Image (cartoon, rainbow, N blue to C red):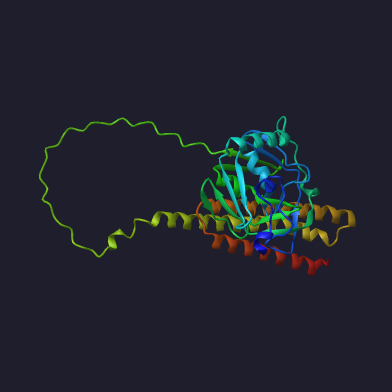
Amino acid sequence: MLKQWKLWSVSSMLLLGLAGPAYAEQTPTAIDVYYAPMQFVFDNNVFSPPEGQQGFIYEGSTYVPLRFISYSLNKAVRWDANTYTVTVEEPKAADLTEIKEYNMNTQVRGDAAKEKVDAANLKPTAISAYKEKVNYVFDGKTKEIGAELPGFIYQDSLYVPLRFFSESIGKTIEWNPETYTVTSKTKEAAKPEAPKEETKQPEQPKTETPVTTPPVAGGGSGGSGGGGSSENAAAAQAKAEEKLKALENSCRSALQPLADQYADADEETKKQLKAQGAAKVIECELQFGRIISEARSQGVSEDILSSYRIKFEQVQEEAKQELLKKFGK
């Protein structure tokens, strides 16, 4: 009974952005998010979430309201409050009318702005949200999502990770770090190769080949048939670890000089150094999120991706404690 009372809203209420008064996680979690002036471009159309439902960045991933991302991508969405399952599917006639009306209010006329965003002005904002394990079904197929990408219920709206959602329905995601523009495009179908001209070879006289029965080898000769996918995943894992190591070195190289200058700086300079450091931290988190998303799409397991997240957070915490020890709060 309690499970049914949690998130009691029916599908239509969820689509209005409501999620009910009680949740699977009964106590909200305090998290730090970044509210940036993000722009969303879906298949060449610019959209903006409804007032009061601004997207945010959490641990390198962009989160947006469920209904906003679904309707912007012209998908119908259903919610099962008993199983915490979001079902995304092709819209029916009644859905199309509602989607069209919704998008009329969220679509921005004109092109996306090209002005650069000053990341130094971005600061973390502490919010209290319900962190939920959400199940996803896209066009009849269940799509697994890692624990590091939970759903968040904040101010009665369910926020979902944009990249995971978009890629699950066949979109590609691009991020412009200068203008903070998220672009989602339909993946282009592979172009068929042009047929090759066949060169006829002169016929050779046929010779009879005696039929022989191969010896039974106990099944060992078939072992290499299914190794391709595991080899690809291993290669993707190695590539991801190489990128993560390079990211760590790059971030350390950028942040260390700021820390070295901080001790002897005046108050005004300290403020500037803090702002530059905060901007770099955001950039590092976003790059980390992109590396993880790419590795996931290439078959790296969720357990391995979770270990990367744990290591990433551990390195962040160690660096933070080191700075606090050196300079104080």
The N terminus - image quarter: bottom right
Q: Quadrant of residue 180?
A: top right
Q: Where 289 sits versus 92, above or below?
A: below
Q: In terms of depth relative to the viewer, which is nearer, 120 or 254? A: 120
Q: In terms of depth relative to the viewer, which is nearer, 25 or 208? A: 25
User: Does residue 179 appear to the left or right of 121 in the view shown?
Assistant: left
Q: Where 261 sits versus 180, above or below?
A: below
The structure residue drawn at horizontal position 63% and vertical position 59%, both measured from the top left corner, is: 133
Query: What is the number of callouts on the image?
Result: 0
Q: In terms of depth relative to the viewer, which is nearer, 74 or 22? A: 22
User: Does residue 287 appear to the left or right of 187 in the view shown?
Assistant: right
Relative image position of residue 214 (x, y in whole percent): 18, 58
Residue at the outermost right position = 267
The structure residue drawn at horizontal position 67% and vertical position 53%, both measured from the top left corner, is: 60
The C terminus - image quarter: bottom right
Relative image position of residue 202 (x, y in whole percent): 17, 32
Relative image position of residue 160 (x, y in whole percent): 65, 51
The structure residue drawn at horizontal position 70% and vertical position 31%, both measured from the top left corner, is: 111
Q: In terms of depth relative to the viewer, which is nearer, 82 or 182? A: 82
Residue at the outermost bottom position = 325
Residue at the outermost front position = 1
Relative image position of residue 113 (x, y in whole percent): 73, 35
